[in-house]
Amino acid sequence: MIVGCLTNIVLDWILIFGFNLGIQGAAIATVTSQALTAILTIGYYISGKSNLRFSKSNLKLDKKLIKSSVCNRYVAICYATCSKFSSSNIKYCT
């Protein structure tokens, strides 16, 4: 994480002020530093230095859990939307 933050800070200065890229430079710096952090993190876990171990069985998708999660989110979103529109319409009725 520290490497990613430092990379972002350095690249921000270089791209924003050095190359005059402005907000685009900040975006490029952020994406680059996040990608670097992801690569370093994955490399750390693959190298075997971590106590955390991955196995193929741990990476399988649980279809029941996904279905349950998707349904719950759908219901929550629909409920919120219906509540909003209902309250908006009620104020016009009074």
Image: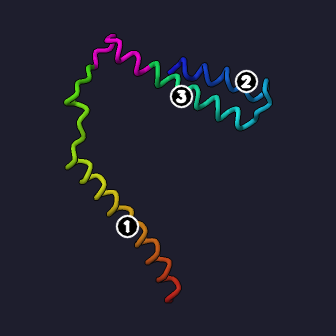
Residue 43, horizontal then vertical, whole percent: 41, 17
Q: Residue at x 35, y 18 (%)?
A: 45
Q: Residues within 10 Å of mark 2 (few under 14, many from 20)?
A: some
Dividing the picture into quadrants, the one containing residue 56 is top left
Residue 28 magenta-highlighted: no
Q: Which residues are magenta?
A: 41-52
Residue on which disc 2 sits: 13
Residue 17, labelled with which disc? none
Q: Nearer the viewer, residue 38 or 81?
A: 38
Q: Amino acid at mark 1?
A: Cys
In this view, 35 is above or below 83: above
Q: Amino acid at mark 2?
A: Trp
Q: Nearer the viewer, residue 51 or 47?
A: 47
Secondary element under disc 3, as helix, strand or loop, is helix
Q: Is residue 19 left or right of residue 53?
A: right
Residue drawn at 47 percent across, 83 percent down: 90
Residue 18 as seen in the image, left or right of residue 5:
right
- In the displayed structure, would residue 30 be above or below residue 91? above
What number is the disc on residue 78?
Answer: 1
Q: Is residue 47 magenta?
A: yes
Measure how far apart labels 1 and 3 are at the Cα level. 34 Å
Q: For residue 53, what is the image quadrant?
A: top left
- Across the whole image, how many numbered discs are drawn on residues? 3
Q: Position of residue 62 (x, y in %)?
A: 21, 43
Q: Which mark is residue 34?
A: 3
Considering only order in the chain, which callout, 3 or 1, is on the residue closer to the N terminus? 3
